[in-house]
Image (cartoon, rainbow, N blue to C red):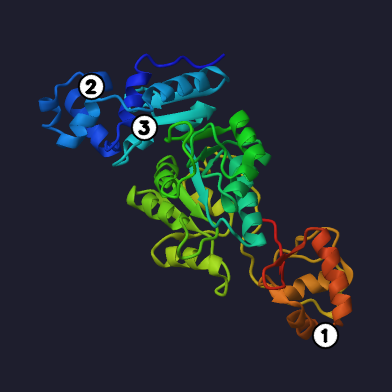
């Protein structure tokens, strides 16, 4: 059954669509006159006490797109279960967003609206072009946190965002996707199946009217909702110019925790995380680190997680070549890997290396290395990265 349509929905849509009247001005009008219907009942002279002459004229004339938008929105709400809209005046509006300086007027929702009141939300954000290890870490860290009862919040972008949502879903956990388009569109299209999964068991959220395209300005704006819904923000990989740093900054300004996973000093995708750590973000290696800092251990189930950024292990000697590769605790990192492939993995370390560098490090012939690397890649133990390099993958 579809959700009931608010009686004053048309007035809220008109206010949100009025040209030249942004969210800040709209909130000022609501504070002065009450609900949108009362705003539109004012005379021009009364409106001019609060807004500019141009804005007052715009408020007195219904926007050209208003009627069509009302029809589109009502049809969208009615055609599928789990769709709803909450306004600033609704009791169901998330209280955590009301603490922001600029809460959105409307929230379009699809899925489990109860997640808006989830007490343990964590934003997991990062690069749209992460390293293979970064993407794997985002997935595994989110899976572990979701299994412990944390709701994972992200933006459904390519890279870290998508991996975070997928990790939460793979744990049968909770996830919220805050998107930069209308909810009748999926961006990027590559995440169409992911969006359907989230709508079924998680929640899709947007402040943008139906039909809104993925304009570049929408994404920094939606980041404040990601930060606002979350007790903390975890940045997995981010370059210095990454939009993820906007989310982290907004989280810090709201008094929320900021966490960052360190990486190689040579990796551009790690420089943003390192900058955050220098500015006071908390360095994170495991899901347990996050749970402890957010004081969730009392109410969350124990979670087992290996280091997301392991220390460099010693190279295996010839006598160890037939043994499975193990981490610092003696636990197998790559089950089923033994012989020269295990030795090669250990000697690779955790930084991307070229074939020439591997040949110099191991002393093996290039032909042998290529064969072993191919086997390891097919089995998911390593990945090729730009520049003809190879990187070892480690489950978080």
Q: So how many labels did they put on this image?
A: 3
Picture residue at 77% right of the left edge, 78% below the top: 355
Picture residue at 33% right of the left edge, 37% below the top: 103
Nearest-to-viewer mark from 3 and 2: 2
Q: Is residue 150 above or below residue 307?
A: above
* Quadrant of the frame with the N terminus: top right
Q: Earlier in the sequence, mark 1 or mark 2?
A: 2
Q: Position of residue 202 (x, y in %)?
A: 57, 33
Nearest-to-viewer mark from 1 and 2: 2
* Badge number at residue 236: none
Q: Is residue 192 above or below residue 396?
A: above
* Quadrant of the frame with the C terminus: bottom right
**Residue 244 showing in the rendered view:** yes
Q: Is residue 25 above or below residue 125?
A: above
Q: Are marks 3 and 2 in contact (CB under 8 Å)?
A: no
Q: Quadrant of residue 88?
A: top left
Q: Position of residue 118 (x, y in %)?
A: 48, 33
Q: Sort mark 3 into few (<14), some (14-19) or many (20+) by Cα contacts within 10 Å.
A: some
Residue designated by label 1:
363
Q: Position of residue 137 (x, y in %)?
A: 63, 56
Q: Secondary structure at mark 2?
A: helix
Of residues 274 and 337, the one drawn nearer to the viewer in this rendering: 274
Residue designated by label 2:
40
Of residues 368 and 278, the one drawn nearer to the viewer in this rendering: 368
* Whole-number angstrom distance, CA of label 1 to CA of label 2: 79 Å
Q: Position of residue 180 (x, y in %)?
A: 47, 42
Q: Secondary structure at mark 1?
A: loop
Picture residue at 49% right of the left edge, 63% below the top: 273
Residue designated by label 3:
95
Q: Secondary structure at mark 3?
A: helix
């Amino acid at each position: 059954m579809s959700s009931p349509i608010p009686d004053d929905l048309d007035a809220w849509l008109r206010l949100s669509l009025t040209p030249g009247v942004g969210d800040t001005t709209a909130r000022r009008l609501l504070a002065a006159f009450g609900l949108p219907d009362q705003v539109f009942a004012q005379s021009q002279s009364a409106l001019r006490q609060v807004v500019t002459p141009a804005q007052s004229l715009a408020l007195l004339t219904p926007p050209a797109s208003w009627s069509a938008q009302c029809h589109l929105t009502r049809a969208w709400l009615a055609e599928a279960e789990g769709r709803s809209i909450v306004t600033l005046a609704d009791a169901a509006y998330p209280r955590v967003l009301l603490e922001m300086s600029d809460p959105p007027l409307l929230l379009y929702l699809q899925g489990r609206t109860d997640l808006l009141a989830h007490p343990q939300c964590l934003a997991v954000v990062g690069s749209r072009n992460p390293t293979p290890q970064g993407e794997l870490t985002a997935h595994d860290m989110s899976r572990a946190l979701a299994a412990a009862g944390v709701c994972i919040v992200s933006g459904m972008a390519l890279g870290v965002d998508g991996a975070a949502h997928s990790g939460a879903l793979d744990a049968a956990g909770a996830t919220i996707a805050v998107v930069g388009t209308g909810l009748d569109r999926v961006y990027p299209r590559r995440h169409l199946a992911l969006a359907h999964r989230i709508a079924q068991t998680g929640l899709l959220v947007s402040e943008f009217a139906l039909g809104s395209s993925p304009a570049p300005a929408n994404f920094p704006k939606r980041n404040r909702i990601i930060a606002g819904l979350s007790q903390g923000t975890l940045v997995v990989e981010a370059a210095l110019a990454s939009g993820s740093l906007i989310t982290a900054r907004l989280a810090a300004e709201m008094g929320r925790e900021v966490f960052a996973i360190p990486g190689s000093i040579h990796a551009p995708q790690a420089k943003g995380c390192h900058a955050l750590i220098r500015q006071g973000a908390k360095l994170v290696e495991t899901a347990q680190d996050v749970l402890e800092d957010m004081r969730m251990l009392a109410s969350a189930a124990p979670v087992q997680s290996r280091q997301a950024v392991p220390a460099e292990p010693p190279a295996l000697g010839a006598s160890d070549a037939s043994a499975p590769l193990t981490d610092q605790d003696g636990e197998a990192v790559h089950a089923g890997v033994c012989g020269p492939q295990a030795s090669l993995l250990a000697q690779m370390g955790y930084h991307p290396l070229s074939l020439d560098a591997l040949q110099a490090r191991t002393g093996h012939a290039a032909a042998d290395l290529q064969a072993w690397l191919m086997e390891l890649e097919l089995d998911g133990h390593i990945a090729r990265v730009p520049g003809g390099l190879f990187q070892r993958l480690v489950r978080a």
